[in-house]
Image (tube, helix red, strand yellow):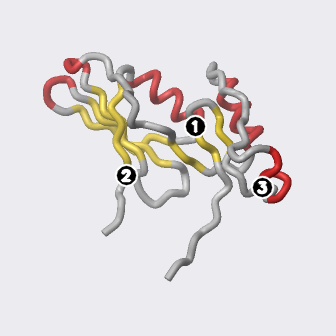
Amino acid sequence: MKTLFVSYRVTDLDRSLDFYFALGYAELGRINADHGVHLAILHFPGEPAASLELVHRPADGRVDVGSGFDHLAIQVDSLAATMERLADAGLRPGPVQYPGGLDLVARRPGRLPDRVGGVAVRPCRRHHGG
């Protein structure tokens, strides 16, 4: 088995697409289903398949995130360039936080997850476990 993609319900599809496009996602396609439901299928360029689906169901009303959602983790080549691209798209990323404190940063430079607003941005290493 494997995970195919994550699906999020959104209140405003165009605004949500603008956000994910600013992060670097590209749209693979869109499905207009019954009852005004719209699905947007996204991925990062270079990914072999879809990794994110946005579901817009206007008849269901506003989507409340609730307390179960924490963050979306993505890997970027440059945190500074990503934050600049978000700002250029009219978004206001929050300050970078250092979970574990700056002492952990000094001991593990480049290996600490950074958090930008509601988006976790982390350098990733592949885990080859057994």
Q: Identify the mark nearer the N-term, 3 or 1.
A: 3
Comes first in the chain, label 2 or label 3? 2
Quadrant in the picture for residue 14: top left
Q: Which mark is residue 110?
A: 3
Q: Which mark is residue 91?
A: none
Instruction: Please state which of the two labelled residues, at mark 2 or mark 3, is closer to the viewer.
Output: 3
Separation of disc 2 and disc 1 at Cα?
17 Å
Which type of secondary structure does the marked residue at label 2 adopt? loop
For the point 65% across and 35% down, the residue is 116
Residue 109: give x, y in percent of width and height: 81, 56
Q: Which residue is mark 1?
A: 119
Q: Report the Cα–Cα distance between label 3 and label 1.
A: 17 Å
What amino acid is found at the position of numbered circle 3 in the picture? Gly
Figure quadrant of the N terminus: bottom left
Q: Which residue is mark 2?
A: 5
Residue 100 to residue 118: above or below: below
Q: Position of residue 24 (x, y in %)?
A: 58, 41
Mark 1 residue element: strand
**Alpha-carbon span between mark 2 and mark 3:** 27 Å
Provide the secondary structure element on which disc 3 rests. loop
The answer to whether the residue labelled 3 contacts the one labelled 1, judged by CB atoms less than 8 Å apart, is no
Residue shown at 14%/30% (left/top)?
A: 34
Tell me the kind of residue under disc 2: Phe
